Amino acid sequence: MELLSAVAIEAAKELAKNVVKRFFHLGDKKEQDLVSVGLAVGYFYNFLSPLNDVVINNIFDLYMPADEKSLTLASPKITYNMDYVNIEVIIPKRLDVEAKTACENEFKKSHKGFFYLPENNRFYGINYFTTQIGNLQSLTIVDFARPAWAAKRYYEEILGLRTFNNDNKWLATQLSELTAFKESLVNLQKLANGVFVNKLVFRDIG
C-alpha cells in the first residue's frame, strides 16, 4: 500500500484545522466543508455536553448497580472529585474496518457504569477504567467516537467515492476528516466552557 508522505500528512492536517477555524471563528461556512465538523457537533451534544452538565458541582457520581434493571439513586455509587476524573475518546487512526475493529476491541476492555442527569431525570451509561494514585483512585471515562466512522459512510454512500486504502486522495481525505473531528470537539468544549476542556484526551487506535 502506498503511504502518504510526511508533507502530504501535514497538508491534510492543516486543511482540517483551517476548516474548523473557519467554521468556529470566521462564520464562512460552505457546503464543501468537511462532514466531520457536523458529526462532532452531534457527538458533543449527545455525549460530552451531558457529562459537563452533571459535574458542574465539581463531583461525579459513578453508579455501579449489580442489576441494571433495578438502577435507582439509592444504588451503589462512588463519588469522584473532578480533580481525579478524566475523559478519553477513542478515535480510529484510519477509516477502515481494521481500525474500527481495533477501536471496538480496545473499548471492550473498559467497565460499564452509569451517571444520573437530574435535568433529564434519567441515567446514562458510560464506560470507564480506574487508576490507583497513592491512596486515591482516579476515574477515566472512555468512549469510542463512532460518529467519526460515519464520515466513511458519507463518502461511500452519499458521494459515491470508492474508499480504497491504496488511494492517496482517500488517505488524505480521511486524515483531514479525523483531524477535523478532534479539533471540532476541542473547540466545542472551549465554547461551552466545559469542565473537560483540559481533561479531554484522544487515543488514536488502529
Image (cartoon, rainbow, N blue to C red):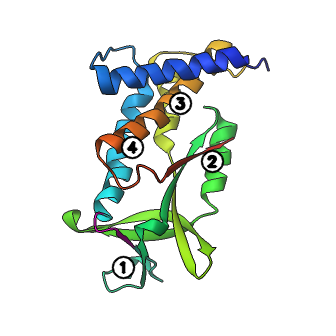
Which mark's residue is nearer the viewer, 1 or 4?
A: 4
Q: Magenta region's main secondary structure?
A: loop
Q: CA distance from mark 4 to mark 2?
A: 17 Å
In this rendering, the count of numbered labels is 4
Q: CA distance from mark 2 to mark 3?
A: 17 Å
Disc 1 is placed on an element classified as: loop
Disc 3 is placed on an element classified as: helix
Q: Residues within 10 Å of mark 2 (few under 14, many from 20)?
A: many
Where does the C terminus fall, quadrant-wise? top right
- The tag on residue 103 is 2
Residue 188 pos. (x, y %): 35, 40
> Which of the 4 image quadrants contains residue 101?
top right
Q: CA distance from mark 2 to mark 1?
A: 28 Å
Which mark's residue is nearer the viewer, 2 or 3?
A: 3
Amino acid found under the numbered disc labelled 3: Thr
Amino acid found under the numbered disc labelled 1: Leu
- The tag on residue 71 is 1
Magenta-drawn segment: 56-60
Disc 2 is placed on an element classified as: helix
Q: Which residue is mark 3?
A: 179
Q: CA distance from mark 1 to mark 3?
A: 38 Å
> Which of the 4 image quadrants contains residue 172?
top right
* Residue at figure coordinates x 59%, y 26% from the top left: 175
Which mark's residue is nearer the viewer, 4 or 3?
A: 3
